[in-house]
Image: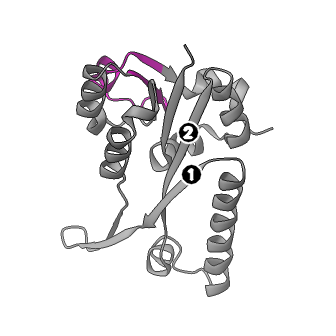
Amino acid sequence: MPKKALILIDASNIKYYLKEKRWRISWRRFQQYFRGLYDHIDVVYYEGIRTKAVFFDHKPTASLNEFLEAKAKKLDFFKTLKSIGFKVVTKLVSRVYDHTQGKFRHKCNFDVEITIAAIDQMDRYDEFVSCSGDGDFVKLLKYLKAHKKKTVVVAPGKRLSGLLAKASNQVVFLKDLRAQIEET
């Protein structure tokens, strides 16, 4: 029986790990790796887009041109992902003032969107692959397993909730895939 997988990537959860370890994923190689495991895959990449205000909160001395270049580069990246078959879901990063710290905090959480997509598309896949170590997905994995779906977590190193690991059928660490998916 052919195996179909839904692969949902929480970019912010993975980006910190990659930055810390100083390596980059080739998303084309990532896709090829998973195409080798499944007969059919749907891959959805979730990432927040920084507004001008958020950009300047992080880089107060940057110029408007630097913001526009960063924005264009990000949009080109999304175009590339789409051209190789990924679906890309974005939304603006929120900016909230934290009175206790006296500065703006930034948040862009896709947990609800990822959960809804996983449940809405249950009839289209046999295995659910979550590229996030976020413990907020424990209940989702339990729900999917109760509906006879195999669940796989692709975890970014130490950023793996112990409860999420227990809830999944399988955990794969990004570091163990490095040779297959690293950008060369």
Q: Position of residue 117 (x, y in %)?
A: 38, 45
Give the class, few, some or many, for how many residues have Cα within 10 Å of label 2's Cα (few <14, many ≥20).
Answer: some
Q: Position of residue 42 (x, y in %)?
A: 55, 39
**The residue positioned farthest toward the right in the image shown:** 184
* Segment colored magenta: 150-171
Q: Residue furthest bottom?
A: 64
Q: Residue furthest left?
A: 100
Quarter that holds the N terminus: top right
Q: Is residue 152 left or right of residue 63?
A: left
CB under 8 Å between callouts 2 and 1?
A: yes
Q: Which residue is mark 1?
A: 87
Mark number displayed over residue 157: none
Q: Assign the C terminus to one quadrant of the image.
A: top right
Which residue is rendered at x = 32% and y = 29% of the image?
A: 161
Residue located at (47% from left, 76% from top): 51
At label 2, the amino acid type is: Asp
- Identify the residue under disc 2: 42
| Residue 56 located left or right of residue 72 | left
Local secondary structure at mark 2: strand
Decide if residue 166 is on the left or right side of residue 130. left
Which of the marked residues, 2 or 1, is nearer the chain's N terminus? Answer: 2
As for residue 3 lying within the magenta part, the answer is: no
Secondary structure type for disc 1: strand
Q: Amino acid at mark 1?
A: Lys
**104 to the left or right of 18:** left
| Residue closer to the observer: 16 or 48 | 48
Q: Residues within 10 Å of mark 1 (few under 14, many from 20)?
A: some
Residue 164, magenta (yes or no): yes
Between 142 and 125, which is closer to the camera in this rendering?
Answer: 125
